[in-house]
Amino acid sequence: MNSPRLVAIASGKGGVGKTCLAIGLAQSLAESGARVALVDGDLGLANVDVQLGLDPRRDLGDVLAGRCAAAAALMQHPAGFALLPGRSGSAALAGLEGAALQGFARDLRGLPMDWLLLDLGAGIGAVQRGLAAAADLLLVIATEEPTSLTDAYAVLKLHRRDAPAGKAGLVVNMAAQPARVHAALDAACRGFLGQALPLLGTVRRDPRVAAAIRAQSPLLTRHPNTPAAEDLRRLAGALAEAWATA
Ligand SMILES: Nc1ncnc2c1ncn2[C@@H]1O[C@H](COP(=O)(O)OP(=O)(O)OP(=O)(O)O)[C@@H](O)[C@H]1O
Ligand SMILES: [Mg+2]
């Protein structure tokens, strides 16, 4: 069995759409027949289960305390992907470091999946950096807000330090002019990090995204043909293709 592809989703700045995009990507990849686990990597401040209206019996708190294996904490979502829920309000999880994080990433890689999507929390703490460095690909999400750009660049800069050979790509969310967001970040990465930043996809601003969250239902289930859902499917297709040709 091949090891799953571990994709970490980060942004630095909070509230730019990481969790929405992670859920949409998980569902899109599952729709195309892949085995997908969405892992709530916002250790200590979990909310994927809340966005999806689920009530987990087990979560990452149990896994990391050794009470159950990661596979035993997976919940199957009707949309076709599995979820490894996080735990909200756990200082122990939020404070994981070094070897514990690496052990966690190793356990995840043992799951019988094609894709593991790791939805990271905001910020550039040890958990976000450690999990990003352990991933095969870091997807950085940015909007056109200047603070999102500076935070996304900070994530990329630290990732270059933490995982010099690591791969990273950009997804622009909710921007009127996504090409400008990409151009600005790509120029910074080329100029200061000596590396281009591929644009892996863009997702349009779409009021149905918030409507799906309010209904605690995945976007692609509730509004399968809305523009953001189309963009997420395109992004999933691009990811799968990039992998197949890598
Ligand atoms: N493409 C989009 N169109 C419209 N609204 C969006 C889009 N993407 C995300 N949003 C809105 O942005 C808000 C934040 O989204 P989300 O929770 O996914 O962000 P996040 O980066 O995971 O936040 P956090 O850093 O707190 O984990 C949500 O309320 C959602 O409605
Ligand atoms: Mg989130």
Image (cartoon, rainbow, N blue to C red):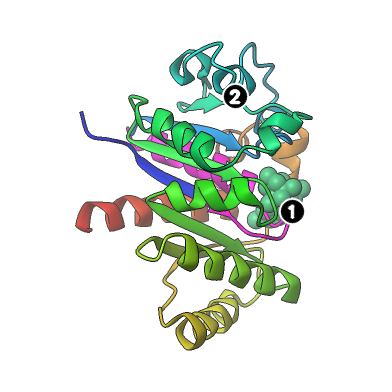
User: Is residue 167 among the parts visible in the rendering?
Assistant: yes
Q: Magenta segment range?
A: 9-33
Asked if residue 7 is positioned above or below residue 144 in the image, the reply reads: above
Looking at the picture, how far across and down is residue 172, in whole percent?
Answer: 57, 66
Label ID, residue 60: 2
Residue extending farthest front: 99
The residue lying toward the viewer, choosing from 189 and 225, is 189
Q: Which residue lies under the disc numbered 1?
A: 15
The residue lying toward the viewer, choosing from 4 and 210, is 4
Residue 37 falls left or right of residue 175: left
Q: Amino acid at mark 1?
A: Gly
User: Is residue 201 among the parts visible in the rendering?
Assistant: no
Residue 75 falls left or right of residue 238: right
Q: Secondary structure at mark 1?
A: loop
- Which residue is depicted at the point 52% across and 38% down? 101
- Report whether the residue tagged 1 is closer than 8 Å to ligand 1: yes
Assign the C terminus to one quadrant of the image.
bottom left
Looking at the picture, how far across and down is residue 15, in whole percent?
Answer: 74, 53
Crowding near the residue tagged with mark 2, few <14, some 14–19, many ≥20 C-alpha atoms within 10 Å: many
Q: Quadrant of ligand 2?
A: top right
